[in-house]
Amino acid sequence: MRAARTVTTSALEPLRARMQATTALDIAGEVEFGHVVGTKLLPLPVWRLITGSRPAAEEFGRVFGGSPEPRPVDGVERWEVVSERSALSIVVAAPEAIGLEMKLWDSRGLAHHCDGTVFLTPTGRAGTPCGCPPLMAQRKERARFGQGPQPVTTVPFQLADGRELGMLRFRSSSWRFAETVDAFRAELAKVHGPALCELSVESVEFTAKNGRRVSYCKPVATVRGPWSLGLAA
Ligand SMILES: [Zn+2]
């Protein structure tokens, strides 16, 4: 706590906003892409919803295709719906809603937790420079050798065609997606209010140098324009 007092209040304001954006929301479900069969993730360009609410799962399936399947975790009821969509029309409240955290875990737990510039935790260090390099490419290089944190990008949103489902969230540990956050936030800022966006997942396939076929899915978030209908409570 003592170190945090040395940081001016104005410097802490954006930090608080960022932390609130990623922790204080009441999230009704998570969207992920691909189709999990057993313990394997099939890289299919479709979105699926994971939620604790069966009515929410049924509504999602009704609008986007797919049937709810029970996916309990540690005895807690959860439902998964694999939709038929590779793109979702979503509503994002503001650029500050997009969270980008960087995390490095070691045997003792969370060893480095920052936003790429300043620490987010522990409380005593929050807001102070974390020492990560400025460029994503440099950060990625450090992470590759276990010396730097990895990104966790968070996009909280409502579905344009299913706002009654409440606030949903997409979280990604992809470096490529993290690299797009600045541009995505800049486009959101131009809208000056809630923005209609597209969250899509694209298949990427190529032949690697060793001749192996490589395929993976890539999430992409794009701003379409202002959202005038307001956000559901
Ligand atoms: Zn850092």
Image (cartoon, rainbow, N blue to C red):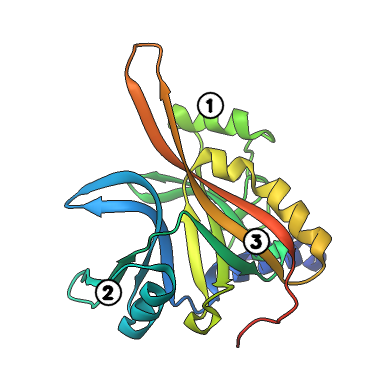
Q: Residue at x 42, y 72 (%)?
A: 29
- Would you call the spot at circle 2 few (<14 residues within 10 Å), some (14-19), or many (20 or more)? some
- Would you call the spot at circle 3 few (<14 residues within 10 Å), some (14-19), or many (20 or more)? many
Residue topped by disc 2 = 78
Q: Which image quarter: residue 233? A: bottom right
Left or right of residue 125, residue 217 in this image: left
Nearer-N-terminus badge (2/3): 2
Residue topped by disc 1 = 141
- Check if mark 2's residue and mark 3's residue have beta carbons within 8 Å: no
Q: Which mark is residue 197?
A: 3
Marks 2/1: CA–CA distance: 37 Å
Mark 3 falls on what kind of element?
Answer: strand
For badge 2, the amino acid type reads Arg
Mark 1 falls on what kind of element?
Answer: helix
Q: Using the image as rendered, state which of residue 77 and residue 133 is in the foreground.
A: 77
Q: Using the image as rendered, state which of residue 71 and residue 139 is in the foreground.
A: 71
Left or right of residue 79, residue 150 in this image: right
- Would you call the spot at circle 1 few (<14 residues within 10 Å), some (14-19), or many (20 or more)? few
Q: Which image quarter: residue 49? A: bottom left
Q: Does residue 37 sit above or below 83 in this rendering?
A: above
